[in-house]
Image (spheres, rainbow, N blue to C red):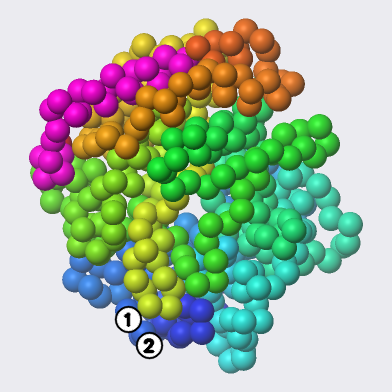
Amino acid sequence: MEYTLMHKEIPVMGLEIDSATCAVQKIGEIYAAEHIPPGTLGYDKKTDRRLLNKWWMGRSIPMSRSGIRAALEIMDVSLPQELVEKSLGLSLSDQYWMRPKGQDIRWLDVNFFRNDFSGDVGNALFGNKPESAKLDFMSPDNTSDGCLKKKWKIIDGKRCLVKAGTGQGQQEPFNEVLASKIMGRIGTINHVPYSLIWENDMPYSVCVDFINEDTELITAAGIMRTMKKPNHQSDYGHFMECCEALGIPSYEDSINKMLAVDYLIANEDRHLNNFGAVRDAETLEWLGLAPVFDCGASMWCSQPTSRINTESADTPSKPFRKTHAEQIKLVTSLGWLKPESLAGIDGLCDEVFRQNPYMDVYRREKLCRAAMARAELLLEISHGISRNPQSTDEMKLL
């Protein structure tokens, strides 16, 4: 089927999508080259069908999503990619969409920032069968990534993401709340606030969409595909070089803070699609790195209580190093981190995890001690950085 890739009301390029595989089969005429999604051009700045397909297919729900097979069966859909096409590729993370050829559809009439959307897909993703035999597939849930169960919901007029936990402990929603409270206490970190809601005796984290109809999130993966990475350069150095070349403001300070927070909470899953930069969708001006979000896979949530160990040098990390002990060395400044902001962090941890009926006392107490120990380690590191500062250029070589 033939489509026009749109950026809000701007036609970007003609595309042909294969109905069987839902993949981009052919790239047609280019109408607005400057609005082509970042990271989908080849290094020669020409359209690249492989990269465009990577971006397009990446908009769909991954098959690793918890409960996705059951949800597809409920919706009578074979592949998650089919859902993207059924909702015109619309998202609550950016302003791109597909307009079928010959159809006079306006952005103002279909975008999810202004218009209501169906809850049918979200309900199916949470394992609930629809009340009606005919499902409404117009939903931003079709373009939500990540492995945890999640759905978009309009709460008090705001677009909110509701996300579940996993396993017997259901710890991830509480981790989100804890991380946002810690960053709020530090006071200088741009972050997304999270809260808790309960449905059918199960906890879920909730956050308001930090993107609106005038802005969009460009992931770190997309940013890093805008330039070719030299063989000798690290992923960290390449990301920083790309930010510099694109003119993203204050990127070094933002990365320092994100990596420090991830160290503090032992975040194991800061992958290239859950951080990035925000830009103005109209002017294409880069506004800065995105606020810190998606911190659920932290605080040893995937580990048994016996494996909670703050002293371990091999605590897993992403995206630039395999361990936090190595990744924290990339931080060039911690001057913004005040000891008083981390004082009593064990009490804050207790306050949050005490709300979790699925966590036993022994685990909660061990996590509280771990949080305090982690804070002390980070403060020790900050003293070392202040005595032996490294320049950004030096860090890019690591």
In the rendered structure, which amino acid carries the disc numbered 1? Ala
The stretch in magenta equals 370-397
Visible residue check, residue 168? no
Instruction: Identify the residue shown where x is 77% and y is 44%.
Output: 127
Number of residues whose C-alpha sits closer than 10 Å to that of mark 1, classed few (under 14), some (14–19) or many (20 or more):
some
In the rendered structure, which amino acid carries the disc numbered 2? Tyr
Image quarter hosting the N terminus: bottom right
Residue 308 vs 282, above or below: the answer is above
Q: Nearer the viewer, residue 384 or 92?
A: 384
Query: Which residue does the numbered mark 2 point to in the structure image?
Result: 31
Helix, strand or loop under label 2: loop
**What whole-number distance in Å separates the C-alpha atoms at marks 1 and 2?**
6 Å
**Where is residue 255 drawn, in percent x and y?**
31, 44
- For this view, does 192 lie left or right of residue 124? left
**Where is residue 6 drawn, in percent x and y?**
49, 80
Which of the 4 image quarters holds residue 247?
bottom left
Q: Which label was assigned to residue 33?
A: 1
Residue 398 highlighted magenta (yes or no) = no
Helix, strand or loop under label 1: helix
**Where is residue 298 drawn, in percent x and y?**
49, 29
- For this view, does 227 lie left or right of residue 35? left
- For this view, does 54 lie left or right of residue 228? right
Residue 380 highlighted magenta (yes or no) = yes
Residue 98 vs 196, above or below: the answer is below
Which of the 4 image quarters holds residue 152?
bottom right
**Where is residue 20 drawn, in percent x and y?**
57, 67
Image quarter hosting the C terminus: top left
Which of the 4 image quarters holds residue 102?
bottom right
Q: Which label was assigned to residue 305?
A: none
Instruction: Identify the residue shown where x is 61% and y is 53%.
Output: 208
Majority secondary structure of the magenta segment? helix
Residue 80 vs 63, above or below: the answer is below
